[in-house]
Image: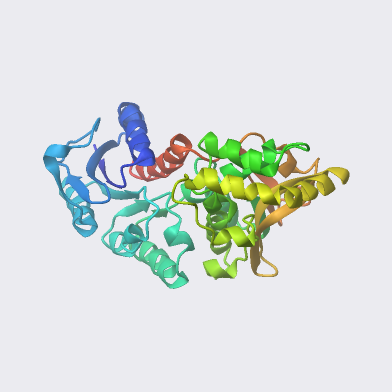
Amino acid sequence: MPTLHVGLVGYGLVGQELVGQMCAAAPKLEKEIGVRIEIAAVSRSRTMALLPAGTASLTEWPKSQEEEADLKKLGQHVVDLAAASGGRALIVDNTASDTPAELYEAWLLAGADVATPNKRAGSGPMSRYEKIMEASRQTGARFLYEATVGAGLPVVGPLQALLRAGDEVDTVEGIFSGTLSYIFNTWKPGVKFSDVVKEAKDKGFTEPDPRDDLGGTDVQRKVTILAREIGLKIELDDVPVKSLVPEKLQTWEAPADKKLGDAFVEELAAYDDEMDALLEEAEKANEVLRFVGSVDVKSGKASVKLGRYPKDHPFASTQFADNICAVSSKWYTPRPLVVQGPGAGAAVTAAGVFSNIMEVMNGMR
């Protein structure tokens, strides 16, 4: 029976959730697909563990096999196990770091597939991105990144399927931040914007520094990935972002005696009137406010900004922390292809990565 040897880079919330999903599904997959899945290695920021062949499950960090982290060595270990068994090597990068992304090309050239929710490679320097894609073409090893845009929401895969089938995409736009989706789905007239941001922070939707969400950089990375997917050669800085963080607060620092998130929300309250006016104008026009990333193929441009949409627009239908993506193309016009659903959280992100792992396993049948 062929074996997929998986090396996990990053063992935080997503990494541990992914291990749980893999271990739970392994017996069924072995029976139905005829492919065995084994965990070959796991790494954290400073340490790693290279596991022996036959490690089918992992319930806790393997402290007895712990050593200093060396991602080149980890990758070689996974490739060597696959070569010895006649199976396949897969390295999963669950981090948000540039360090593993620098090794994707080498891993692919060594014949290992790479799957990741890490947006750094897809939105980083175009020169590195092109080398990664060329390495995949040369060896046939797959670079899989469904979870980079919609987490568990299938966005990249359907877009790739349309392009492979010969469709011509005109625009891609969507709400790609679960945090900002929650904020604008929750914010209603009579409620202060800063109060909604505080609620989102208190519920754990925002980063410790809410500016990381309100600034739109994460959405900028996702839009860059989508733009490249449909053929635009753009850099991250080519995508303008209209930040929701007031200019004076962009470089503001919290007092030493206060938590950053709490202090920021207090400062943000001074700008509630400006934001409330935007919501009022939208309401009068029977519209909603949504923070949207978009790509236009004809103009070759992409953007990230707050926009107004009619209440019968698909973007007005989002609930809670939904992500949504609308693709307009030669085949999907005048009504776009719309994908909508939960797009944030460790469980759905791990599920998005696991869907890519399943692609590799199905190819080994």
Q: Nearer the viewer, residue 260 or 358?
A: 260
Q: Nearer the viewer, residue 228 or 256?
A: 256
Q: Give the colouring mode of the picture.
A: rainbow
Q: Quadrant of the N terminus?
A: top left
Q: Find the residue positioned furthest to the bottom.
A: 127
Compared with 281, 98 (above or below) is below
Residue 2 in the image: state x and y as whole percent.
25, 40
Q: Residue at x 44, y 34 (%)?
A: 347
Q: Residue at x 28, y 37 (%)?
A: 37
Quadrant hosting residue 303: bottom right
Q: Find the residue positioned furthest to the left.
A: 64
Residue 248 in the image: state x and y as whole percent.
61, 61
Residue 152 placement, left or right of 362? right
Q: Is residue 8 visible?
A: yes
Q: Residue at x 62, y 56 (%)?
A: 245
Residue 205 placement, left or right of 244? left
Q: Nearer the viewer, residue 202 or 337?
A: 202
Residue 152 placement, left or right of 31? right
Residue 203 placement, left or right of 309? left
Residue 194 in the image: state x and y as whole percent.
65, 43
Q: Is residue 175 visible?
A: no
Compared with 25, 207 (above or below) is below
Q: Residue at x 43, y 59 (%)?
A: 120
